[in-house]
Image: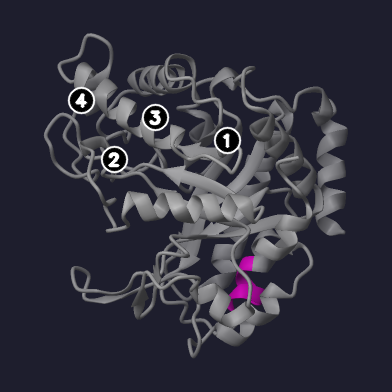
Amino acid sequence: MKKLLNLLFIVCLYPLCGQGQTLINAKASPETKNLYKNLFKIQEDKTLFGHQDALAYGVGWKYEQGRSDIKSLTDDLPGIYGWDLGGIEHARDKNLDGVPFAKMREYIQGAYQRGAVITLSWHWDNPLTGGSTWDTTAHTVKSILPGGSQHEKYKLWLDRGAAYMHSLTGPQGEKIPVLFRPFHELNGNWFWWGPNTTSVNDFKQIWKFTIDYLIRKKALNNLIIVYNTNSFKDEKEFMLNYPGDQYADVLSFDKYQFDGNGKAFIESTRKELAILTRIAQAKHKLSAFAETGYEAIPDATWWTQTLWPTIKDFPISYVLVWRNAGFMKSMDKMHYYAPYPGQLSAPDFQEFYKNPSLLFEKTTATHKLYQ
């Protein structure tokens, strides 16, 4: 109820959102338009719950048909699935986290047929140096702009990503709608497209070129474009790299809890959610909390006492926690963001699951989002 009242308050401040709930791509497929429209309805008083790579692996297992750490606790699956295209730019068989692209396609097709939603990010390698996505060599973005030394390579990379997204088809050959989140965490300094490596103007130019290329030239009429920052201090920072209303359908940010101070996380994140949802409502865009979590979840009641109090009053279409990689030798630690049987926060997550305002796959399916 509080979430709905908050939404009504926002609506009173701005023109009715029904006047502007249209995708930036006028040629978007019927399924894509329906998903976008229905996600607006969902976020009025509900939120999809998501998990990255949920079907591919979990803590202590990989590629077991029908398995998911979340399913092991709830007999249900996420309402939205996150996957990553990193590696497709090189025409590799597997993405940067080892997920075979063929299997990823199968997982996406299955989730779509069950009524769930798909979001894709892209941890692409540095096109200037050949380094990883975390190679922050200066002027990488400038090198892939039209006229830049790596522009033709970048177009080839986009061609490969587009071909893969075109291959995501449903039972009738329809293209599966995808919430596409390129250049994510764009205000952070850890990726090659960050503010320490590129100017605001160059970033906006590459964003516009990328979206125009994928939608206009490659005719990807199944994309819903997600603008995504990391944590931000105010509206000015959030909007600094915003490419314009014609180039984004969803406004979102990522934020993780890094210490035991849950109260501080709640307070600061709620301020950001208030800014995000206010801007999104004014611009007639969807809102999302695109990545969050608390690594290894050392707080037994994190789900009901931290995450839910953080998001409960805000109209956001989805919230997604990161992947369950298990023990990572490169980090020399456990790396996971959803619980599994026996994990400290598992009982609390089962209570969290019962919240009628949170949509997992079974309840998401009842909303028939693609119709």
The percent coordinates of residue 174 (x first, y second) are 58, 34
Dot 3 alpha-carbon crowd within 10 angstroms: few under 14, some 14 to 19, many 20 or more: some
Front tag of 4 and 3? 3
Dot 1 alpha-carbon crowd within 10 angstroms: few under 14, some 14 to 19, many 20 or more: few
Q: Amino acid at mark 2?
A: Ile
Direction front: furthest residue: 172
Residue underneath mark 1: 235
- Where 314 falls versus 355 (above or below)? above
On the image, which quarter does residue 357 sit in?
bottom right
From mark 1 to mark 2, how far is it between C-alphas? 34 Å
Q: Amino acid at mark 3?
A: Ala
The residue sitting at 67% across, 48% down in the picture is 317
Front tag of 2 and 4? 2
Residue underneath mark 3: 162
Does the magenta portion include 32?
Answer: no
Front tag of 1 and 4? 4
On the image, which quarter does residue 200 sit in?
top left
Q: Is residue 65 left or right of residue 196?
A: right
Residue underneath mark 2: 88
Picture disc at residue 125? none
From mark 4 to mark 3, how far is it between C-alphas? 25 Å
The mark nearer the N terminus, 3 or 2, is 2
Quadrant holding the C terminus: top right
Dot 4 alpha-carbon crowd within 10 angstroms: few under 14, some 14 to 19, many 20 or more: some
From mark 1 to mark 3, how far is it between C-alphas? 32 Å
Q: Which residues are magenta?
A: 302-307
From mark 2 to mark 4, how far is it between C-alphas? 23 Å
Marks 2 and 1: in contact by CB < 8 Å? no
Marks 2 and 3: in contact by CB < 8 Å? no
Dot 2 alpha-carbon crowd within 10 angstroms: few under 14, some 14 to 19, many 20 or more: many
